[in-house]
Image (spheres, rainbow, N blue to C red):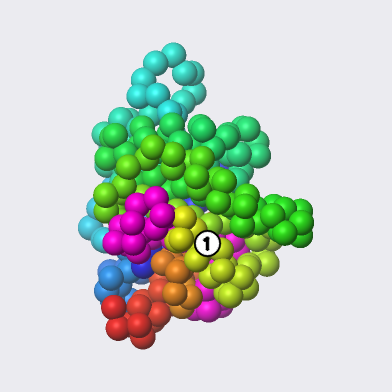
Amino acid sequence: MLVAGNWKMNTDVSEGRALADAIAEGLSSSPPDLGDVDVLVCPPYVHLPAVLDALAEVPVTVGAQDMHAEGEGAYTGDVSAPMLASIGCDAVILGHSERREYYDETDADVNAKAKQAQAHGLVPIVCVGETLEERQAGEADTVVQDQVDGALSGVSVDSGDALIVAYEPIWAIGTGESAAPAQAQEMHAVIRDDLTERYGANVADDIPLLYGGSMKPHNAYGLLSQPDIDGGLIGSASLAADSFLGIAEKAVEVQEESGS
Ligand code: PEP
């Protein structure tokens, strides 16, 4: 189980440091024994060194929210996979719906970035998800399968450690209205089938499939207890240590109950 926070473009560096300190404090003073639950935070680029430092002594890994598809070059304003790897990042969010909407990122862009991320030891967190209109038109499965196929074409994955996929229905992001657990599970099963066809069941079963879209402590248990939901990608609730760790505690509860 993986609980991942996407801070988006929120907090200045000192606020981000304070948030990371509060997460570290929460994990060391009254430690919810995390067991097999992994925790990851993805702050803005400029926060990364401070956040890495703040979390150095606790079992929380750090990722970025995007990166360029090239390793270096004349790309003013961009950040590369080798840069992220060189400071100790473990993962990178790719193809978030906000990147797709505001920067016209395509599945082909996500695909190139995923390959580049893997080449530098970063785990790509590939985000997919349909709009409300697409869902209402009965196209949700096809849209998501197309995104998965486009993003992963030629991406080799030989173990569940090499890839994370996040299903984030766009209508649930930042709206306070999460998908119903059964609705999310249905799409996760579609994605799992797709990954099974692509990588075989042994690998596909180990690829973490995260749900994202208004996950909060009060609805996390229902979502995380679904068989194909292996964690959450959390936006606004990751901006406060108590709600973020509250979700991690629900993940621990689910994990303990499932006996794994
Ligand atoms: C997100 O944007 O990745 C997200 C899931 O946001 P929120 O939790 O705020 O809906």
Q: Residue 225: where, in percent of width, then height? A: 46, 78
Name the quadrant containing residue 69.
top left
**In the image: residue 221, left or right of residue 133:** left
Can see residue 51? no
226 magenta-colored: no
Above or below, 13 against 138 in this view is above
Q: Residue 44: where, in percent of width, then height? A: 47, 42
Which residue lies most toward the bottom here?
Answer: 257
Which residue lies most toward the top here?
Answer: 74
Can see residue 106? yes
Which residue lies most toward the front here?
Answer: 197
Above or below, 46 against 51 in this view is above
Q: Residue 96: where, in percent of width, then height? A: 55, 45
Instruction: Tell how many labels.
Output: 1
Q: Nearer the viewer, residue 110 or 236?
A: 110
Q: Residues within 10 Å of mark 1 (few under 14, many from 20)?
A: some
Name the quadrant containing residue 132.
bottom right
Q: Residue at x 32, y 69 (%)?
A: 37
**In the image: residue 72, left or right of residue 129:** left
Residue for badge 1: 190
Quarter containing the C terminus: bottom left
Q: Residue at x 53, y 79 (%)?
A: 222
Q: Which structural element holds mark 1? A: helix
Q: Residue at x 65, y 39 (%)?
A: 101
Which amino acid type corresponds to the residue marked 1 in the rendered image? Val
Q: Which residues are magenta?
A: 195-223
Q: Nearer the viewer, residue 178 or 49?
A: 178
Q: Residue at x 30, y 30 (%)?
A: 82
